[in-house]
Image (tube, rainbow, N blue to C red):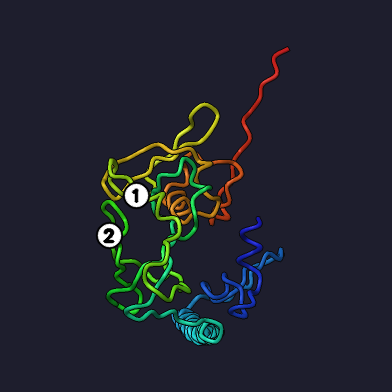
Amino acid sequence: MFEFCWNNSKHAATGMAPFYADQGYLPNFQIKNEESGEPITSQTAANHTRKLNEITQKLKSIMTLSNSTMNHYYDTNHKDIEFLVGDWVMLKTDHIRTLRPCKKLTEKFIGPFKVIEKITNQTYRLDLKNLVGKIHDIFHVEKLEKSKKIQDGQQEYGIEWFVNDDEIFKYLIEVIDSRYSKDKIEYQVKYSDKSKEWVDSTEFDKNDIEIQAFHNRNPDKPYPSDRVLDRASRTRQAPIRYDFQ
């Protein structure tokens, strides 16, 4: 009933109800004592088809205008980030596996690192010679932040937690599974060195992109009850309790 009311109500974005946009008319639930008796002819079908085409063209115009409006506001408030070769940047650690015993204690940024090559407008190559281990040196601009470093030789921030001669440097690629384990949720994660590991859900922030992406792909997999996910339709039913007396 809720879905029917939603589809039968006028929407602000299009100025018409979804049912009208799809069928060309709104359902009429008035009870009549007799049928209208109006014959269905080919001309009636042609008129209905023409009406649907007019509605489709109107919807296209409305959606084009809506997209243009959104693009205008986005371009007005958005500023592209660009770095030059030789700039110093800080690197986000949200996608990198560190040596910290708890991810929540890891610095959000490490560095600074020097930009040594501009690959595209959105990707840059960094000089990671101070990091011991294997890690890809090309990063998206969203993982970088301008650093205030001016001179070479300044002490890097947070690097010590990424240096270990006995362990290959690796970073998280994706979350591939979840499970219940002793009344808590664990996630199986895949690293850049192709290794896998089960990690307690408390090691992740509630809005981690990798966690949200995993649950969007696998809506039936276990997830913490207090986790905020970008799926408004997902609900969890309370367990049924039977009282035998």
**Residue 78 x %, y %:** 52, 81
Quick check: 184 above or below 19? above
Quadrant in which the C terminus appears: top right
How many C-alpha atoms fall within 10 Å of the one at disc 1: few (<14), some, or many (≥20)? some
**Residue 76 x %, y %:** 55, 87
Quadrant in which the N terminus appears: bottom right
Do we see residue 54 in this rendering?
no
**Residue 55 x %, y %:** 52, 82
**Label 1 amino acid?**
Val
Secondary structure beneath label 2? loop
Q: Nearer the viewer, mark 2 or mark 1?
A: 1
* N-terminal-most mark, 2 or 1: 2
**Label 2 amino acid?**
His
For this rendering, which residue is in front, 66 or 29? Answer: 66
Q: Residue at x 59, y 41 (%)?
A: 225
Q: Is residue 115 left or right of residue 226?
A: left
Q: Which residue is mark 2?
A: 136
For this rendering, which residue is in front, 42 or 27? Answer: 27
Extreme residue toward the front, this view = 153
Do we see residue 133 in this rendering?
yes
Q: Which residue is mark 1?
A: 163
Quarter of the image holding residue 87?
bottom left
How many C-alpha atoms fall within 10 Å of the one at disc 2: few (<14), some, or many (≥20)? few
Q: Residue at x 49, y 82 (%)?
A: 79
